[in-house]
Image (cartoon, helix red, strand yellow):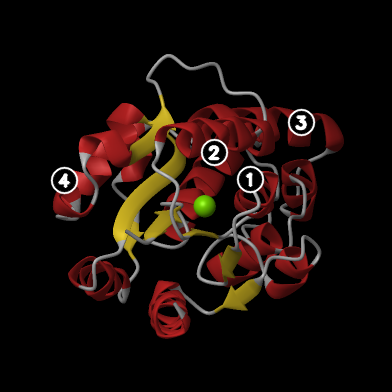
Amino acid sequence: MPRLITDFDGPIVDVSERYYQVYQYCLTTISRPGQAINLLPKSKFWSLKRSRIPETQIGIYSGLDESQAKDFAHLRRVTVHTMPYFKHDLIIPCALSALQKLQSRGVELVVMTMRRTRELDFALSNYGLDGFFRPERRYCLTNDYLKTQDIEDKTLLMQKAVQELPPDQTWMLGDTEADIIAAQSQNLPAIAVLSGIRDQAQLSAYHPDYILDDIAAATDLILEQILMSSASA
Ligand SMILES: [Mg+2]
């Protein structure tokens, strides 16, 4: 059974509003009373994130001094993945129909994410996506997992998945370098999408097999490749 291993945030969920809300909260919290700050508009903020500008630099662009920018980056890191902010996430408009299409064409769906179990389960039920990913096809971090770096954590998760899942034609879909590197570590074709937190230049630097707009385009590509491989078999 052909299989798609998909990342969650980026291909399926748009996290830009959550990140922007956390940015505003951290800026307000860290700035001194009366300090002139420069709240970046969301489009500017998000394009800095997509081009991977460090958080401290975003703090400085927003009017903080260097020591504040360090505190700002720390506060952001401990806040961005907390339950009160997850409600700002939005499902990517084409995601539901793409998942339906893949499932109806017999592609097994596996989700692989740096979310914790409770954060993933909350979102899957919130967006009505439970039925696409069987419980044993959800690769995420346990609620008490000590995170290191996304690239290392995701590569470990990918190793585990490849050991557990029956070998079959498999694609990996994601929106960051961590997804691409995890796929490459197991010699899986990597499809990167532009609907998430990295722009074209950032993704190209890691040489994914494909860079596409979104999960809908990835679905078309996968179904076409399945058709081609069954025709040649
Ligand atoms: Mg992602």
Of the numbered discs 2 and 3, the one sitting upstream in the chain is 3
Q: Nearer the viewer, mark 1 or mark 4?
A: 1
Instruction: Name which residue lies at 56% across and 78% down.
Output: 212
Q: CA distance from mark 2 to mark 3?
A: 32 Å
Q: Is mark 1 within 8 Å of ligand 1?
A: no
Q: Is mark 2 within 8 Å of ligand 1?
A: no
The residue that mark 4 highlights is 125
Q: Which mark, residue 158?
A: 2
Pointer 1 with pointer 4, Cβ within 8 A: no
Of the numbered discs 1 and 4, the one sitting upstream in the chain is 4
Instruction: Name which residue lies at 44% across and 63% down.
Output: 11
Q: Nearer the viewer, residue 94 or 34?
A: 94
Give the quarter of the image for residue 152: top right
Q: Nearer the viewer, mark 4 or mark 3?
A: 4
| Quarter that holds the N terminus | bottom left
Instruction: Give the residue at the far front of this rendering.
Output: 233
Of the numbered discs 4 and 3, the one sitting upstream in the chain is 3
The residue that mark 1 highlights is 186
Instruction: Name which residue lies at 50% across and 41% down.
Output: 25
The type of residue carrying mark 3 is: Lys
The type of residue carrying mark 2 is: Met
The residue that mark 3 highlights is 70
Of the numbered discs 1 and 3, the one sitting upstream in the chain is 3
Tell me if residue 109 comes above or below residue 193 in the rendering.
Answer: above
Q: Secondary structure at mark 3?
A: helix
Taking the image as shown, residue 74 lies to the left or right of residue 118, namely right
Pointer 2 with pointer 1, Cβ within 8 A: yes
Of the numbered discs 2 and 1, the one sitting upstream in the chain is 2
